[in-house]
Image (cartoon, grey):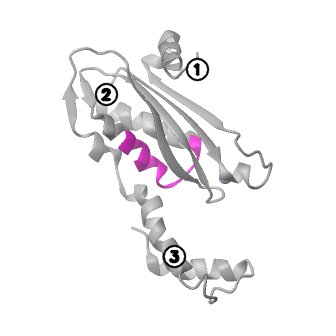
Amino acid sequence: MVDQEKVNPAVRLLLDGIGENPDREGLIETPDRIARMYEEIYGGLDESAKVHLRKTFHAKDNEMIVEKEIPFYSTCEHHLLPFFGQAHLAYIPDGKVAGLSKLARTVDVYARRPQIQERLTGQIADALMSCLHPKGVMVLIEAEHLCMSMRGIKKPGSRTVTVVKRGEFLENPELARTFYAMLGRA
Ligand code: ZN
């Protein structure tokens, strides 16, 4: 839960600190708005992917399942600026599959908190491994970081790609190639 009583005065102080007048008309409700917005964009801190991945279905065959182009929005923990893009997931079930919407939910649980892209990628893979006990998982995330686009090296449109493999994807490069081909990246 976001503690409004802490966030409100902190945002006021922040506005004051950058040389703004927190009492002017346009800013007077901003601390309140930000506190409410944080409930949503940092709501993943109170959530567990286990809740979403608890309900599973029995799978007869254990072919690779790919859920691609899952849009997500997260916040870089170094600058508190957004990074956003698409997550692509693959897993090879071992008798258990999750509902497709639950995979997107899992991405959200970990995206909606202060994050770095590398950890986000790993946490999604680990959640799938521990809840579905599949034979393997692979997660690829591509994202634009506003802390790179609007400040610092200013490279708008450049995207950061992170990849995490678990289980059979580590042992068998053919599986990773199949996944890349399904993403049109082969
Ligand atoms: Zn950053």
Q: Nearer the viewer, mark 2 or mark 1?
A: 1
N-term mark: 1 or 3: 3
| Label 3 sits on residue | 7
Distance from label 1 to label 3 (Cα)? 43 Å
What distance separates the C-alpha of mark 2 from that of mark 3?
Answer: 39 Å
Q: What stretch is highlighted in magenta?
A: 104-117
Where on the picture, by quarter, is residue 39?
Answer: bottom left
Q: In this view, does 158 lie to the left or right of 117?
A: right
Give the main secondary structure of the magenta stretch: helix
State the SS at label 2. loop
Residue 132, located in which quarter of the rendered image? top left
Mark 3 surroundings within 10 Å by alpha-carbon count, few (fewer than 14), some (14 through 19), many (20 or more): some
Question: Where does the image place residue 107, in percent across and percent down from the top left?
Answer: 43, 43
In depth, the one of 117 and 82 nearer the eye is 82
Q: Which residue is drawn at 57% across and 85% down?
A: 28
Residue under numbered circle 1: 185
